[in-house]
């Protein structure tokens, strides 16, 4: 089974369709509930809903999902009934398989209810009609000529006694989103040095500053205090999102004091020092943080 542990929860919705065709009189009988087994439409609707809830049990690699809603409807034509199912959930993975399973089982149920009347009925056209939600819906990209800065704050790394992993990880993550113009700096845990570097990035028009380190509780963890001297407007949701995402993976995420905000049109985010903390924080905020730039240009949400 594919891991979805690095995904965020979003509202997911999928609609699938299927059809069952047969003789006109059989189609009419199905729609009015006049079959040897009774009211076919009501039974098929319940069967489709129940099947959607059991998808993970029927298809081996599907993840168990807490479905928020399943809707199944039927539209009659002369020789065909179209079955439409929409599944909705707030989760880490899509619900297209739930919608497809719903229409498949609903159509099979109609077949079972009327097969004594018409053994030549055909089920077909099973397909995904629409899918919404997840990262594919949030395809924010960096503006043209985008400039970023990575600031590593660590006494040990600045002294050359510790190798930087987190800063390198940030650079690779940025490159995944087409950001290659990256200023990379290693500084000791010194407030004045960090403030000077961040202000330099702002004055030079660097659009995104990501620091790593100095967000903990040590007396040498001063990156947050430095960033507060540069940030003009805090954006609490960014740091809240990183902590919330991390807290679901390690209880120590609550001890990060990281902040985020804007100075002029530069977004500044202070990330944890550990490579794991950096990786999880980046997964939590990318690519969604890139939506800040059209917002700052007056684009709104």
Image (tube, helix red, strand yellow):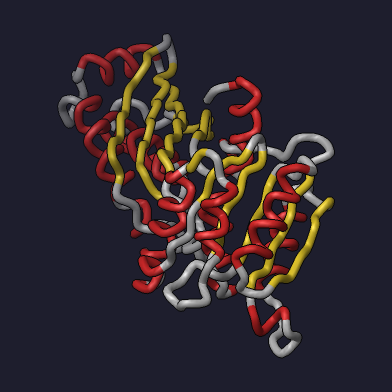
Q: Horizontal and vertical percent for residue 155?
A: 64, 80
Query: Viewer-proximal residue, 200 or 287?
Result: 200
Residue at x-position 36% and y-position 66%: 254
- Tell me residue 122's x, y (percent): 46, 30
Residue found farthest to the top: 78
Choose between 99 and 267: the one closer to the eye.
Answer: 267
Using the image, determine if residue 126 lies above or below residue 93: above
Q: Nearer the viewer, residue 248 or 113?
A: 248
Residue at x 44%, y 29% (from the top left corner) = 120
Q: Is residue 300 left or right of residue 95?
A: right
Q: Is residue 295 above or below residue 285?
A: above
Residue 272 visible in the picture: yes
User: Of residues 10 and 200, which is closer to you in this image?
Assistant: 200
Q: Is residue 220 left or right of residue 179?
A: left
User: In the rendered view, would you say 48 is above or below 222?
Assistant: above
Task: Single out the residue that lies furthest toward the left.
Answer: 38
Residue at the front extreme of this rendering: 192
Q: Position of residue 46 (x, y in %)?
A: 22, 35
Quarter-wise, where is residue 226 in the image? bottom right
Q: Residue at x 36, y 27 (%)?
A: 118
| Residue 219, image x, y percentages | 46, 77
Can residue 2 be seen in this snapshot? no
Above or below, 94 against 19 in this view is: below
Residue, x 58% and y 37% (percent of image)? 138
């Amino acid at each position: 089974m594919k891991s979805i542990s690095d995904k965020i929860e979003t509202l997911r919705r999928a609609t699938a369709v299927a059809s069952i065709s047969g003789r006109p009189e059989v189609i009419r009988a199905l729609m009015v509930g006049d079959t040897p087994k009774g009211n076919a439409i009501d039974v098929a609707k319940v069967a489709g809903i129940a099947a959607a809830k059991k998808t993970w049990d029927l298809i081996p690699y599907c993840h168990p999902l807490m479905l928020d809603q399943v809707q199944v409807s039927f539209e009659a034509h002369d020789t065909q009934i179209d079955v439409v199912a929409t599944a909705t959930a707030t989760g880490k993975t899509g619900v297209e398989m739930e919608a497809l399973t719903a229409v498949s089982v609903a159509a099979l149920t109609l077949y079972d209810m009327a097969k004594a009347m018409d053994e030549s009925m055909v089920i077909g056209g099973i397909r995904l009609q629409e899918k919404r939600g997840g990262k594919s819906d949030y395809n924010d990209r960096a503006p043209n000529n985008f400039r970023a800065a990575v600031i590593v704050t660590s006494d040990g790394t600045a002294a050359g006694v510790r190798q930087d992993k987190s800063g390198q990880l940030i650079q690779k993550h940025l490159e995944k989103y087409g950001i290659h113009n990256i200023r990379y700096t290693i500084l000791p845990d010194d407030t004045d040095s960090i403030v000077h570097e961040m202000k330099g990035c702002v004055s030079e028009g660097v659009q995104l500053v990501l620091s790593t380190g100095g967000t903990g509780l040590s007396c040498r963890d001063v990156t947050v205090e430095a960033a507060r001297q540069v940030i003009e407007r805090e954006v609490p949701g960014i740091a809240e999102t990183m902590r919330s995402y991390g807290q679901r993976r390690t209880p120590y995420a609550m001890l990060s004091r990281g902040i985020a905000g804007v100075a002029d049109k530069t977004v500044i985010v202070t990330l944890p020092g550990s490579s794991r903390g950096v990786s999880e924080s980046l997964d939590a905020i990318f690519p969604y943080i890139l939506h800040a730039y059209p917002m700052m240009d007056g684009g709104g949400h």
